Image (cartoon, grey):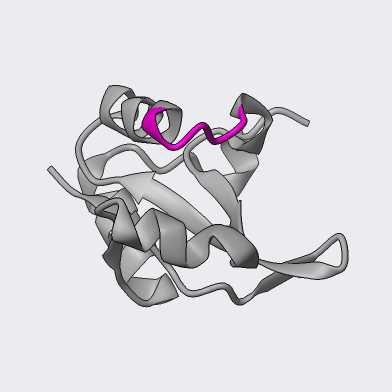
Amino acid sequence: MTILIDPPFWPAHGRLWSHLVSDSSYDELHAFARALDLPSRGFDIDHYDIPQERYAEVVAAGATEVTASELIRRLIDSGLRVRERDRPS
């Protein structure tokens, strides 16, 4: 059971973002997010979007730094990945 975060690389809304996921359960992910007071609006189906300025704080709280490709691979392997075509429109 691990909380994973990729580097702030994804541009949106004038800043860079990371993705925060669990490789075991959404419950674990939401509990980690609550402990850091991450806003629920940051949850996007299977991950939280984390702004660059909070990256170090999230890592210090225990998230494991991985590459974006490693994060996606582990999310898929966990069975928690929601494919783009399965996302609500």
Residue 89, percent from left and from top: 78, 31
Q: Is residue 70 above or below residue 39?
A: below
Which residue occupies 31% across, 72% down?
66
Q: Is residue 43 above or below residue 61?
A: above
**Residue that lies at the very extreme toward the left in this rendered image:** 1
Q: Over which residues does the magenta segment extend?
A: 35-39
Q: Determine the image quadrant of residue 39.
A: top right
Q: Is residue 48 above or below residue 73?
A: above
Which residue occupies 55% across, 33% down?
45
Residue 22, percent from left and from top: 30, 43
Residue 76, percent from left and from top: 32, 51
Magenta stretch secondary structure, dominant: loop
Which residue occupies 12% across, 42% down?
1
In the foreground, 85 or 17:
17
Q: Is residue 9 left or right of residue 68?
A: right
In the foreground, 70 or 63:
63
In the foreground, 71 or 41:
41
